[in-house]
Amino acid sequence: MKPLHARYPFLQSAREAVEAADVDLVTVVREEEAVRTRALDRVETALDSGRVGAPHRRDRVELLSYPVARVLVSLIDEHVLTRKYARAEAATAHERFEAEFTETTELKSRDREQLSIRTLLAEFGMTEGVRETDDAYSVAVGTYLAYATEERGDEWRLVNRTLRDGEIELSESELLVLIRQAIRDRVDEGLPLSVPDAIASHLDAECEQIRERLADLDLTRDIDTVVPDLFPPCMTALLDQVQKGEHLEHHSRFAIATFLTTIGMTTDEIVELFQVNPGFGEEATRYQVDHIRGKTSPTEYSPPACSTMQSYGDCVNKDDLCEQISHPLAYYEAKLDDADEEEIIDWRERDETAQS
Amino acid sequence: MHERTQAYLRGRFGDHYRNQSIDPPPGANEREWGYVPWTEGPGETYSRHNAMIDLGALEDFLARERPKHVYFSAGRYDNPGATTMNEKGWRRSGLIFDLDADHLPSTTPEDSYAEMLADCKDALFRLLDFLERDFGFEEMQIVFSGSRGYHVHVRDEGIQRLDSDARREIVDYVRGIGLEFDELVEEETVAGLGRKTPAENRYLPTEGGWGGRIHDKLVSVLSEVRDLPEEEALERLQEYDGIGEGRAQAAYNLTQERFVEIERGNLSAHAVFAQLARQFATEVVAEENAQIDEPVSTDTNRLIRLPGSLHGGSGLAVRRVPREEIDDFDPLVDAVPETFTNHEITVEVTDGGTVELGGDSFTLEEGVHTVPEYVGVFLMTRGRAEKGEE
Ligand code: SF4
């Protein structure tokens, strides 16, 4: 097992190396405490600091801790953990190769196998979509969008890029950001794995520890979470009107209903929420929400973009974050992301606790 | 709609489908098919989640069922007939753009049908400009929707697997949503002659993207200004916000002495140039964006009207329009189905008015009329007439 594999365990060649070495994962988790510990460390560090921690001094332990960490994440199977873990693996790899690429030649250790941008592109099937130019890279728009959409910041929005004949020019460091996303997808791929009992049974202690850590952080939620405090101003205003029993124009009702549907509320929950308003008959609301959901129409609708909200006069009380986004959902997702470490209570759960 | 009207339309739609060969979309077997049958009463029922395998060969199905509307999914699936998206197993999806007169800010309800369609065609050209020059798409099919606008089906390999967030970026791009002038600008360090500290020059891209569009507009407006007599030029410049006499003079001088900087997009050439560019950005977005219907393009499971089928709300054909024929395409003539052009029928008009169709204009009052069949079909499908007795 090569040092390169230990540093970048998500590589196809690393996986092959593990397979070729005929390692039995059951034996590993049963007998190699060092691997278990380092795997746990990977996951815990991901939660704490968004990285996967310092490598173990033995390449074998370091490499094997990666599949075991993925097993741990699978056993817990919480969306937020999986997301954070994949992000942390990618962030760590990104830091490592960025450092390697900027090291001057003299500093490069002679005998360490190096990763090149070209290898990375080939690894993720991006070779066709990326063309080297004089001092930068030309990236096919499909490739760009496949990896850049998750990046925050106006400079990543396609609309602000010089798109020409299907290509966008990127600097090397921008290209590395796309590769980071490709790594994230690779780590995430196939999770949660279905883990045989023979393996799971040796990881009880580790799982327990991660669960505790998660409970402390209280971030077991994702976009399917209804947290009105984090709603964009427009939706807060509409919801207010609904609950005050005021009349809503069709487009406003459509906006709030699609928004609530998209963030994960069920038809029943929305109907219940709208019940306080005598203007919304239960049947009509149910019909409309089902329609939006695509049950009774050929389409699943998504909430309107800010531009549409604006043209209908539904965009009110814009705040700073509004300036950075173009869609109310993006606002909400951004808030959820920022609030990662804070305490968030899904109001549906809150209601349940209140009732019980 | 009376039973007789419905039976008539269904029968005639059937005649049309029997005489018409329809090219199914690529991968027809992997797509979900949907249709709306002719039914009594005001509501419509959709039949969704059909797989080709259940419907049978497309042409047979159409001739047999004679549906009011026919759709296929932009998405392709492992099990197109499954009822939930999970079971369907999404594989890929073409990218669809929908331009509908209803979504164009330039149209008003008072506009005639022909005017709305003309506006829509302008928007189509703006959209195609983005899709061709910026996105470099090559496999595109342009379709008249059979009613109030156009659809563009993009089938390039590069977009097939994009998720809906990525597609939203494409939508935002053609609509100019989220455009930030400062993000368009590129900075370049110039090692100045005799300068100790190198200067940063700010450039607007001169080709490609929104930057290129804004630059085009700057060059065209400022070259007009350059060629005007000085006094007129100054007046013209002062029409822009925040441009007084002094700045107008500075801008004018720039056009006279250093026009090449304007051509290079060098915003650092003079503050007034940067100021104008920023203002132009807003204008260019307003004028050149293509107001497509967003949810259609971001939805990877969307059902879309089958090209070649008939639109049950107009009796017009959903027609493919080759790229080079768009200019000459007149939907109100060219989308009139052959089948309905050969004879006259009797209808009882319940909601009169003027109908422009087939290159003619018909003004009909309420009552019984004998009209070309396509006019009758148009009125009946719109609910403005019932079939009369022959
Ligand atoms: S900018 Fe967008 S998110 Fe903010 S209030 Fe307006 S519509 Fe809502």
Image (spheres, rainbow, N blue to C red):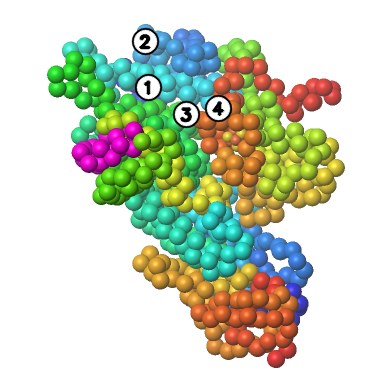
Mark nearest the camera among 4 and 2 is: 4
Q: Disc 1: which chain? A: A
Residue type at numbered disc 1? His
Query: Are discs 4 and 1 located on one and the same chain?
Result: yes
- Please tell me the numbered disc located at residue A94: 1
Residue depicted at 18% across the width and 22% down the height: B191
- Please tell me the numbered disc located at residue A152: 3
Ligand 1 under 8 Å from disc 2 Cβ: no
- For the N terminus of chain B, give its image quadrant: bottom right
Q: CA distance from mark 4 to mark 3?
A: 12 Å
Residue depicted at 66% across the width and 17% down the height: A343
- Can residue B303 be seen here? The reply is no
Q: Disc 3: which chain? A: A
Task: Tell me if label 4 and label 3 are in contact, CB under 8 Å.
Answer: no
Query: Are discs 4 and 3 located on one and the same chain?
Result: yes
Ligand 1 under 8 Å from disc 4 Cβ: yes
Whichever of labels 4 and 1 marks the residue nearer the N terminus, that label is 1
Whichever of labels 3 and 1 marks the residue nearer the N terminus, that label is 1
Whichever of labels 4 and 2 marks the residue nearer the N terminus, that label is 2
Which residue was labeled with disc 2? A58
Residue type at numbered disc 3? Arg
Which residue was labeled with disc 4? A321
Q: In the image, is B211 to the left or to the right of A73?
A: left
Whichever of labels 1 and 2 marks the residue nearer the N terminus, that label is 2
In this orientation, which residue lies closer to the viewer: B212 or A335? B212
Whichever of labels 4 and 3 marks the residue nearer the N terminus, that label is 3
Q: In the image, is A213 to the left or to the right of B136?
A: right
Q: Disc 4: which chain? A: A
The residue segment tinted magenta is B246-267
